Image (spheres, helix red, strand yellow):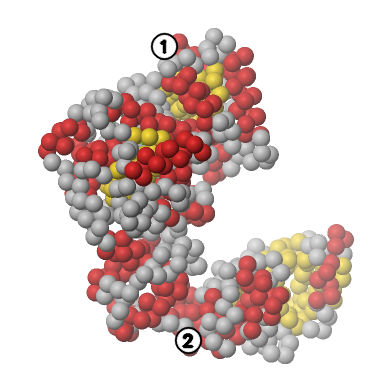
Amino acid sequence: MRIDDQVQFLKGVGPARAEMFRRLGVETVRDLLYLFPRGYEDRSDICPVLKLESGEKQTIIAECLEVRVAHWKNVEAAFADQTGSVKVVWFNAAYLKDQIHPGKTYRLTGRVMLYKRHMQMQHPSFHELGVAGEEDEAPIVVTYPATEGLQSRTIARAAATALDCCLGEAPELFSPSDLKRLAMPSARASIKDLHQPTNLKKIAPARRRMVFEEFFLMELAVAMRRRNARRHQDAPVIPVSPKVDEHIRRRFPFALTAAQDRALSEIVADIAQAVPMARLLQGDVGCGKTVVALYGVLAAVAAGCQAAIMTPTEILTEQHFANIEKYLVGSRVRWLLLTGSLSTKERQAALARIRSGEVDIVIGTQALIQQDVTFRNLGFVVVDEQHKFGVLQRAESRWRNAESDKPMRPHYLVMTATPIPRTLALTVFGDLDVSVIDQMPPGRQPTATRWVRPGKALEMYEEVRMEVRDGRQAYVVCPLVEETDNSDLKAATEEAERLQKEVFAEFRVALLHGRMTSEEKHAVMEEFRTGRSQILVSTIVIEVGIDIHNATIMIIEHAERFGLAQLHQLRGRVGRGANSGMCYLVADPGNDIAASRIKVMIETTDGFRIAEEDLRLRGPGEFFGTRQHGLPELRIGDLIADYDLLQLARDEASALVRQDSDLSRPEHQEVRHSLLARYGRTMELIEVG
Ligand code: ADP
Ligand code: MG
């Protein structure tokens, strides 16, 4: 057997079990060696039966005296060693009767309780001793991430076989001197210790080592991708002269904030180079990112390039469109909207204008990255809320020059209002440079947040009524309900009807939901924007980017069903103008996590703190609410708990790339091989070397 052979051919596995292994992500012997146990239990501490104490989990070695099925299918047994005897019970487990035999000796581990004045061991795990070949079973029992039909014990046996045949082939990525400097054990010793620890103390250093290795490869992939992207020197050079700068600024009816200026100067420095910019523009909702992005767009247009703005939803596309209209009215710049809802004819006409260079700015949804879109001279791309798109890379290879059919390398500016917690900044977004806008435009009032229990809404409605009478507007957001397809729609529809009839009869209540056509949505938004309706009941479609200054009230129904990032985004919709905002979270948090989310919302409006809390509460896998977050599946590392190792790995990886940028040196071949094996395809590193 070799390390890259299919696990199916391992002794004791076979095709049926191989299928179950596949469900755990294990295809080859190598995968199995890197499938590490989740838990360890030391059962070596044997307690004489006489010394058993109630309350604790303990292990005994004892002979079975008798066993019977009692009421409720409980199995009751008596066990004894030289010091005494003890009753053992397994609840509702009649099937166990055939697995436990009087006269045989077992190791039993379980909690001991005082029951009717006798010690009783309850529902212990048990292991028969004296079975051929299993006497030498290790005293530390490991638990693997089992899946249906594949028990932890079966995995342990397969892992033992794999260790026997192939551990010697496991790659060592670090030189002895590096290992010494890092104070880490070798890979082989660590893998062995993780699967078959002889002592609990060996687990932590072994785990540390393998987590480090996993992070190191991931950070190396990020560093290589970053290097790859910047290796090209064929992006358009976009200089910004003082005259151009003045022209662009004149388009905005306000002075930019210091934070906006800082972000701008970083962008301007980037696009003056032929190395394509890859920059993330981060800042809380309403801080003025769009204006900064638009500056970049106009600079590109002034230099004779086309620019594209990509958004996750049609509503946002229209909003950007409206913004551009607002700022550019009367200028010579030409722009158009490219969305999925154009007719074939309209789309063809739009594509022709993009191809010939008759338009300067194209605003659109994912429709922009479809195969048939060719630009004449694309120089600058704004991606709004990138994580909703999945990985940016998908777009890159799509854009081709209309004449030469060569790939075009525009400058990229990615905007996000979901602050990126520092761990993700080192991973998913690690190949982007970052600009942060950490200041709000002047005159903004903070939004207060209040928790309202369902059934205590009357007071809230009165406050809303006062505000709306004063000329303000309100959003009411209803959550997506999972059970049936249409229930979210129904919830929002019913809520709108109820509010209109029973609560706010004197106002106009409008409804917006995800299943409307874009014309319908557009009409509803226009009505709200112009103040013809005062209260907008909506499903989550308004989550991102909507910008209506007069809306100062946000009511979020069933706030317990929303994630923190979503709540923060929603709240950011109000308090965008000169009037302060008010956010009501109507919630009945049934569990602690929901309650702590709501507490965080009340305590802070700091997006970065909220993002870190969100990541902590939900875990990185769910942080983006989609499998397309671009974060590699981790086998052993934990981005939050092992943050120190992540930083160390980042430092080591960038040091290596600085030394040997394409990993061509002989001593780096193990690293190169492992990197390509793990990330070659997903991170598009195949070009390496
Ligand atoms: P973001 O995209 O970060 O959510 P926007 O760029 O949409 O923020 O700006 C939010 C609102 O603030 C917009 O209405 C915009 O016109 C306004 N705004 C942006 N920058 C400034 C500024 N420097 N001074 C005053 N208002 C600004
Ligand atoms: Mg915006």
Up the image or down, 613 lies above or below 424; here it is above
Q: Are marks 1 and 2 in contact (CB under 8 Å)?
A: no
Question: On the rendered structure, is 461 left or right of 208?
Answer: right
Q: Nearer the viewer, residue 164 or 131?
A: 164
Q: Quadrant of residue 603?
A: top left
Q: Nearer the viewer, residue 466 or 595?
A: 466
Give the residue pinned by disc 1: 470
Q: Nearer the viewer, residue 357 or 342?
A: 357
- Badge 1 local density, few (<14 within 10 Å), some, or many (20+)? few
Q: Residue at x 51, y 48 (%)?
A: 625
- Looking at the rendered structure, the kind of residue marked 1 is Asp
Residue 23 — which label? Answer: none
Q: Residue at x 49, y 54 (%)?
A: 628
Q: Quadrant of residue 255?
A: top left
Label 1 beta carbon within 8 A of ligand 1: no
Q: Quadrant of residue 222?
A: bottom left
SS at badge 2: helix
Q: Residue at x 57, y 30 (%)?
A: 516
Residue 610 appears in the picture as rendered: no
Q: Position of residue 445 (x, y in %)?
A: 32, 26
Up the image or down, 317 lies above or below 184; here it is above
